[in-house]
Structures are given as C-alpha cells and as structure tokens.
C-alpha cells in the first residue's frame, strides 16, 4: 500500500506540486518542501533553493564543464546546501564519484536535506553547520571543485560578495581546480550589480573567468579554459 501511495504521489506531482512540509529557517523565513515533477523542491517565498536535477542554474553550468580536466575522484566544496541538488546532480545525472564537504549555516536546511535527499546519495559527504565566509577563512583543505550557492531567501549575503572572501576561496582551489559561483541577474539593478561585481572584483581575482547566463542568474566560472564550447 505504501509503495502504491508513493507512486501515486509522484505521478500526481507531474500534474500539480504536492506540499510535503514547511518549517521555519533563519530570520523566520519559511522553508517549504514540495514534490514537483517527481523531484523534491525546497523553496522560500521568493526563491527556489533546490530542485534535484531540475535545478537549472547548476545543471546548465555543469554541462559546460570539461570534466576531463578534473580528477576522477575530485574533492568538492559546496557552500549552501539546499536539498543537496549539487551533489545529487553530479552523482545521478553526471555519474561523478566525488567526495563532498558541504557548508550550510541554517540548521533547518540541514534537517530537511538529511530527511529528503542525503539518504538517496552514495557519495561521501561531510556537512558542516557554519557561516560560509567564516569557514572559508579557516579551511585548510584543497578542492578540485568549489560551488557557491549561498542565499538568504533571494539575497546574497554581503560577506559572500567581498573581495577578501573570493581571495580566500581561490586559496582553497587545487591547481587546475574550478570555482562555480551562482549570482542573481534578474532585474535591472541586479544586472548592473553583477557587471560591477565582475569588473571590480571577480575579474581581478580570476582574470581568465568565464560566465553563462541562465534564467534570472549568472553563473561565474573561475577559468574559461575549463569550459566546453566557449
């Protein structure tokens, strides 16, 4: 009976999203989990934090990466957990056998990811509940891939946009490693801000950077040489 019910819920989610639960996160924002199109989706009032393999920002970014240039068993740092779309996609869609260190500041997000997504993954994963900027200052490991997906609702914290933060991230990249940074690019003000950020900060720290535009977001890469068809 439980199997039949789960099948029906998944089937119905292609017709209409099914609300599974909502809890309070940081700053009293509501974190809601839905089953939509057969995938788990985590959202706030203004933003989608995670959507399994349909989290298009990183899905499209990963399609651009020349994975042959990275080690087969790369060590990955993920800043911002969501429901774990980044490791989920890399394992399930791109068939990568990576190990992960994930930094997430919101205990409620970690709770939901541990309930809905982490049990579905085989990849080795260490989850650290901590502010991303503080963690980066003290981390002494080296990573082949760093993914930054840090938001509070639809706002990127100021500490994540500072030049010092980016310099600290650069120190953690292994030789030949790559950074992928998810930035907002929706309204005119945000478009102006992303151009300013690239000109004054990102391109200074990563002169050979690359970028792609996805709906409402700009995905920044630390090195254009690591991308396909660019």
Image (tube, rainbow, N blue to C red):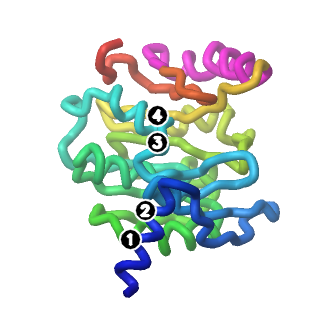
Dot 3, crowdedness within 10 Å: few (<14), some or many (≥20)?
Answer: some
Q: Is residue 15 left or right of residue 184?
A: left
Marker disc for residue 147: 3
Q: Residue 7: which disc? A: 1
40 shown above or below 181: below
Q: Are marks 1 and 2 in contact (CB under 8 Å)?
A: yes
Q: Look at 58% across and 22% down and name the residue there.
A: 202
Q: Where is mark 2, residue-wise?
A: 11
Q: Nearer the viewer, mark 4 or mark 2?
A: 2
Residue at which label 4 appears: 180
Q: Is residue 60 left or right of residue 95?
A: right
- Rounded to the nearest angstrom, the CA distance separating label 1 from label 4 is 35 Å
The C terminus, quarter of image: top left
Q: Earlier in the sequence, mark 3 or mark 2?
A: 2
| Label 2 crowd (10 A; few <14 / some 14-19 / many >=20) | some
Range covered by the magenta-colored residues: 189-211
Mark 3 element type: strand
Residue that appears at 77% across and 19% down: 188
Q: In this rendered view, identify the residue nearer to me: 40 or 205.
A: 40
Residue mark closest to the camera, 3 vs 1? 1
């Amino acid at each position: 009976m439980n199997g039949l019910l789960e099948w029906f819920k998944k089937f119905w989610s292609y017709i209409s999203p099914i609300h599974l639960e909502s809890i309070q996160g940081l700053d009293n924002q509501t974190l809601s989990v839905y089953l939509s199109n057969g995938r788990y989706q985590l959202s706030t009032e203004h933003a989608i934090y995670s959507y399994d393999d349909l989290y298009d920002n990183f899905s499209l970014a990963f399609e651009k990466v020349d994975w042959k240039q990275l080690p087969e068993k790369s060590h990955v740092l993920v800043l911002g957990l969501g429901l774990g779309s980044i490791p989920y996609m890399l394992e399930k869609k791109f068939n990568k056998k990576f190990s992960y260190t994930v930094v997430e500041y919101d205990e409620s997000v970690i709770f939901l990811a541990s309930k809905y997504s982490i049990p579905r993954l085989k990849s080795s994963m260490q989850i650290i509940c901590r502010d991303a900027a503080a963690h980066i200052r003290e981390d002494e490991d080296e990573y082949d891939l760093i993914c930054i997906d840090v938001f509070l609702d639809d706002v990127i914290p100021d500490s994540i946009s500072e030049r010092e933060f980016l310099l600290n991230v650069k120190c953690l990249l292994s030789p030949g490693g790559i950074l992928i940074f998810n930035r907002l690019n929706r309204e005119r003000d945000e478009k102006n801000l992303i151009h300013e950020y690239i000109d004054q900060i990102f391109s200074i720290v990563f002169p050979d950077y690359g970028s792609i535009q996805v709906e409402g977001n700009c995905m920044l890469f630390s090195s254009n040489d690591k991308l396909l068809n660019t």
